[in-house]
Image: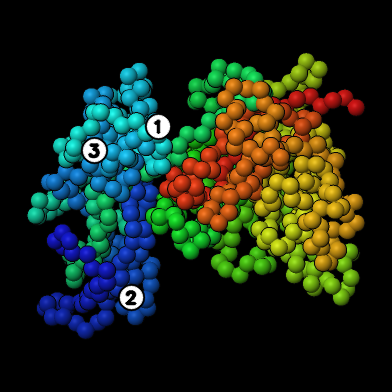
Amino acid sequence: MADPPGVCPAYKEVTVANCDKQGNRTSKSMLSVLRVHLPSDIPIVGCELTPYVLLRRPDKIVTSDDVPEYAPLNGHFLRYKWYRIQSDKKVGACSVHPSEQATLQCLGCVKAKISVARSYHCSPKCFSDAWQHHRVLHDRAATSAVNENGNEEEEIFGRFNSTGSGVISASLTGSASSTSLTNGSTPLYPAAVTQRSGGETWFEVGCSKTYTPTTDDIGHVLKFECVVIDAETIVPVGHPNTILTSRVIPAPSPSPRHLIPVGGADMMAQLDSDGRISPSGTFTVLSYNILSDAYASSELYSYCPSWALSWPYRRQNLLREIVGYRADIVCLQEVQSDHFDDFFAPELDKHGYQALYKRKTNEVYSGNIHTIDGCATFFRRDRFSHVKKYEVEFNKAAQSLTEVAVQTTQKKAALNRLVKDNVALIVVLEAKFINQGADNPGKRQLLCVANTHVNVQQELKDVKIWQVHTLLKGLEKIAASADIPMLVCGDFNSVPGSAPHSLLAMGKVDPLHPDLVGDPLAILRPYSKLTHQLPLVSAYSALLRGVGLGLEQQRRRMDPTTNEPLFTNCTRDFIGTLDYIFYTADSLTVESLLELLDGDSLRKDTALPSPEWSSDHIALLAEFRCVPRPRR
């Protein structure tokens, strides 16, 4: 029988003993549970909960390995159950700050039959700040855009960090206690009333070690139970270990970011049935540093709630965001190798993407090989086919350089300085969509996409320049072998105006550039060699050149002195641009760009990552059209 409500031992050992046929207890050591705890302090809808269960085996070995019913150990196995605790006292959760109890309810939502969960707010200020977004729900209800039961995805998930006009609706009550937060639908797992005590009802909602909270769980406490079971009699041996969660909250989802036309065309007239902008001959490219879990420490990002920093939460939020952009090509950086294999590749495969990956080399990194990150490139199978893949390992290039260009006495020092594990993934794709002019019918449309993550150490400016120069020289060789448009995407860890950025955007570096002062091994000399012939242009510079409607707000988020966004990376300690999408301007033209975020709004909530945005970088996305190259 389950423990009474409120019993939540953080540590409990279960002594298990065998009995002989006469019922006498034997002295044989058996399986025992030492500890049960949850890695995340707040459960979120859609984010898998996997408790940590520490066991002592009969041979005294302590392990966290599972002992399932199909593989018992010395005649015993572990049984897991999850319960939802529903109180007779109705408690509403704020739709903007789900961890706070609601004190106000919008009667306009009730009258419009909008999802009850979206009508709750924790304070008048909360409602006032959220009004600009909240009023959209009323407008949609009035035009029947939201169905009667409020079942659309946007209505299922709550939203954090809403900002508004400061107008308070008059239709508020003083209490949210009159309406239950549960939606009354049948649980996915057949529910059974297991216990009723002190005004609480316990429903069994799961019978495996992991559990994913549903919308039915919002506002309720969950209980996890783990007990040792005798495999022969199927009865519990000893007392169960239990742990209670805090109340389940809705999953915050990123506020919509829209494509902004920059060429003057009426893009709204070109939405397809999926809501994706895809006029004939155009394609979209996304570049996004998603923040590897290995780097997402609470020490670095102490301002982000621990539950929002946990990987089970971030991976779902990142996936929702990435899939929501519906990009034809997706370039991700800081993708851990295990997360690529176990999550991103299979999940994006469900959405029609083929995946390619290049893990960082591990000459420097000494940790678990599975947590080494790398670059992942995905493309939609219905839009492109894979032609060729090139892998650039800067460590190998460093070894080749030191063999021929560095004095013997300096070879070791040069390798120590240059070997930094960074890589680039270059993919050649063939377009399946129609993009043919009258003068080249039937011609194959190829596209070369480079995805990279340049060294982060700010004191090694020579290494950054050398890595970017090495990548560009490789791309020049590809360009020389084929008439092919090129995209260069990634996190370059270089701000606008730096030498790496100048090399990319201008095709050269001024010999007097201050970044060239720190070249102790002369690996960049002569500086006249720091050039390339690719006609690269930064995609987001089109916001300053564009003639489309609605560009004024976006221009305020650009730096006119550098022609780049004011920031793509926003933490408590740094705000600036490190990420870029470059394209060859003689073969591609920018049609539209994903709107930029407002730095003041982000800083108001102490920067990134946050419950709404799950990386310390923002995603960049550009829509391109292939254009005929000028005849030479």
Q: At numbered mark 2, what does the secondary structure look like: helix, strand or loop?
A: loop
* Percent x, y of residue 310: 43, 56
Q: State which tag comes first along the sequence, 2 or 1.
A: 2
Say if mark 2 contacts mark 1, CB within 8 Å.
no
**In the figure, is residue 48 to the left or right of 446?**
left
Residue at 51% across / 34% down in the picture?
257
- Mark 3 or 1, closer to the camera: 1
The x and y percentages for residue 631 are 87, 24
Q: Is residue 178 above or below residue 199?
A: above
Instruction: Please give the residue where the numbered disc 3 appears in the rendered image.
Output: 104
Quadrant position of the C terminus in the picture: top right
For label 1, count other residues whose C-alpha is less than 10 Å away and answer few (under 14), some (14-19) or many (20+).
few
Rendered image: mark on residue 57: 2
- Earlier-in-chain disc, 2 versus 3: 2
Q: Amino acid at mark 3?
A: Leu
Scheme of colours in the image: rainbow
Kindly identify which numbered label has been placed on residue 165: 1
